[in-house]
Image (cartoon, rainbow, N blue to C red):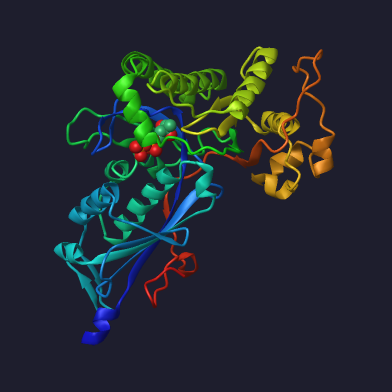
Amino acid sequence: MAADSQKWILMATARAPTNIAVIKYWGKRDENLILPINDSISITLDPDHLSATTTVAVSPSFEKDRMWLNGKEIPLSGGRYQNCLRELRSRAGDFEDERRGIQIKKEGWNKLHFHIASYNNFPTAAGLASSAAGFACLVFSLAKLMNVKEELGQLSAIARQGSGSACRSLYGGFVKWTMGNEMSGRDSIAVQLANETHWEDLIIIVAVVSSRQKETSSTSGMRESVETSSLIQHRAKVVVPSRILQMEEAIRNQNFSSFARLTCADSNQFHAVCLDTSPPIFYMNDTSHRIINLVERWNRHEETPQVAYTFDAGPNAVLIAPNRKVASSLLQRLLFYFPPGPDNELHSYVLGDKTILQEAGIESLNHIEALKPPPEAKDKVPAQRFAGDVSYFICTRSGKGPEVLMEEEHALISSQTGLPN
Ligand code: DP6
């Protein structure tokens, strides 16, 4: 029994979504606690298409904290991981499983080590907010394992210390990160504005743009902006506060025109702040700019916004359509201008909810070949097509927040060895 009691391994597995900001977080007032200089608002994306799954395990036989990301061991020594672990350990509760003879007292968690395995269901290298889903999932699964009895809002304040945008991934639907005023960061938390059923018609298409260059990380990019840009101060103090109110109202009333205007304007201002940084930071590339032009031309032609676009710290476009019909027209336009490269197949070029593709009448590469330029294209100049400039598209929607996965089959760590499966 004594030997056995040293062998036990306790585990929890959870899945957490990514999110895309429609009013951007850019700039910190406290680098260590990760406190922002303005509020931000995001949409949580459907975890079936974009999420992190994390298994956390604890055992008296583990000698140190270890972590594996997509099967590869990574160091856990970083301050951000340590801050999250410390916050969670200090809030841990008693745990008891009489049947297995396991008892962990609150204070006991300080002496135990964790094995953590995490996996993204989308390519990490694609630059799709993997740290947001990752830290949200880490905090959510550890809180479950350690019997932390905090509200989601307080868990979001812990996830925030892993990566700012991660705090917004603790909820589904539409989420606001309120910057807060306190020095401790206790009030810098995420709140849900509306759940994922509130505005169900929205369709989101992510264009993963091929890029050869390594971008400046958000962390150092925003530090440089705070140090050198004067536009960022005006943005944080004057522009964002009023946009936040307008965006909340647009979401509440499902006012797509207002939502789209605010989303595009805020993305463009964030990238203007990047240009106003010294030296300037370029996150978007020619393909990103072409996608903006495509949408702007179409919106102007229809005299009311059809689609919204937003870009984070990289060239990928996130496009939001008010319904499936507009989304399938959007996909036709995207596939016209950005057909797959020679080695691609349709099923690996459009991922996620493929029913949009069917509704767009595209069932084969030949259908893409045969697409006509959209009516708003300038008819004097023959339209240019840019094969291979987009790596792939993901069709998705707004989705739910983190959830515990109960079934053993989801676990990424073996309950026998305590190592990744
Ligand atoms: C452009 O959350 O990745 O995506 O807090 O330093 O980890 P750190 O930065 P991060 O920044 C995200 C910036 C953004 C906008 C946003 O998501 O609001």
As displayed, is residue 97 above or below residue 130? below
Q: Nearer the viewer, residue 205 or 341?
A: 341
Q: Position of residue 272 (x, y in %)?
A: 45, 19
Residue 100 visible in the snapshot: no
Quadrant assignment for ligand 1: top left
As displayed, is residue 407 above or below residue 265? below
Q: Nearer the viewer, residue 343 or 171?
A: 343
Asked if residue 272 lies left or right of residue 381, the reply is left
Q: Position of residue 9 (x, y in %)?
A: 32, 73
Residue 111 visible in the snapshot: yes
Q: Nearer the viewer, residue 153 or 141?
A: 141
Q: Position of residue 213 (x, y in %)?
A: 52, 37
* Residue 40 quadrant: top left
- The residue sitting at 38% across, 44% down in the picture is 170
As displayed, is residue 4 above or below residue 48? below
- The residue sitting at 60% across, 38% down in the picture is 210
As displayed, is residue 205 above or below residue 149? above
Asked if residue 259 lies left or right of residue 101, the reply is right
Q: Position of residue 57 (x, y in %)?
A: 34, 66
Q: Nearer the viewer, residue 183 or 70?
A: 70
Q: How many marks overall?
A: 0
Asked if residue 190 lies left or right of residue 266, the reply is left
- Quadrant containing the N terminus in the rendered view: bottom left
- The residue sitting at 80% across, 43% down in the picture is 365
